[in-house]
Amino acid sequence: MAGRDSPEPAGATLNFVAYLCRACRGLLVARDSRTVADSDGISADATVIDYSCVHCAARYTLWRIPHAQRRDGRVTTEWRERWSTPVDELRLRSPWVFVTNASAVEAELYRELGPAHILRNRPAHAVARRCDCDDVLFVSGLEAFVVHLTWRGKPEADPRWPSVEGYASLDEFVRLRMEPDCAEYGDE
């Protein structure tokens, strides 16, 4: 079952489907496949396939989940697909909350980026924001960035603005930024 944030099928032939990265439109390549045992023993096991983008290295996981249905007195199994990314598994704590207006926040970021800014030509997707200031978490491929938006609606002349803190992964963001923010905010 493809969702709004699912990678897009690039084309299909008999038993081949190519998927494109939602961040940069690069080709996704399967890196690992495994079977997850069914817990109830009734339906078939799920298949899990890990993909990564050949261009930006973004990672995706495709879950092929069996769905049993009764038809004409027989049980048939249909396969449903669900995509997940590391963002899907992110658990935020106060003062961080998920953004509800990602496209508007992303548009503001791109309005503020001057020609020499470090994020100028990078695809960045808004994920979360601090509820008490203008810090926003963006992801680009595997990397995460906390950007302090100025909300001026125009390019900043100084390439240091909007300010950026870079993290190699969402896990690093959680460890080095979100957890200290939570302690400071009082959310233990």
Image (tube, helix red, strand yellow):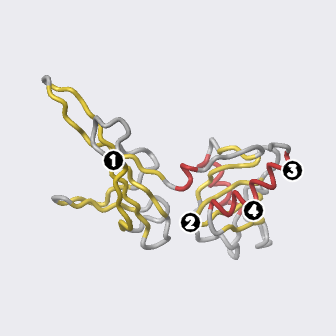
Q: Earlier in the sequence, mark 1 or mark 2?
A: 1
Find residue 18 and report its image quarter. Answer: bottom left
| Residue that extends furthest to the left in the rendered view of this protein | 72
Question: 26 left or right of 92?
Answer: left
Residue 132 point in image, percent of width and height: 82, 45
Q: Earlier in the sequence, mark 3 or mark 4?
A: 4
> What residue does disc 3 label?
184
> What residue does disc 2 label?
142
Q: Nearer the viewer, residue 53 or 92?
A: 92
Type of amino acid at the residue the image marks with label 4: Leu
> What residue does disc 4 label?
176
Q: Nearer the viewer, mark 1 or mark 3?
A: 1
Find residue 145 and report its image quarter. Answer: bottom right
Residue 2 lies, with reference to residue 124, above or below; the image says above
Q: Indicate the secondary structure of the residue bearing disc 1.
A: strand
Type of amino acid at the residue the image marks with label 2: Leu
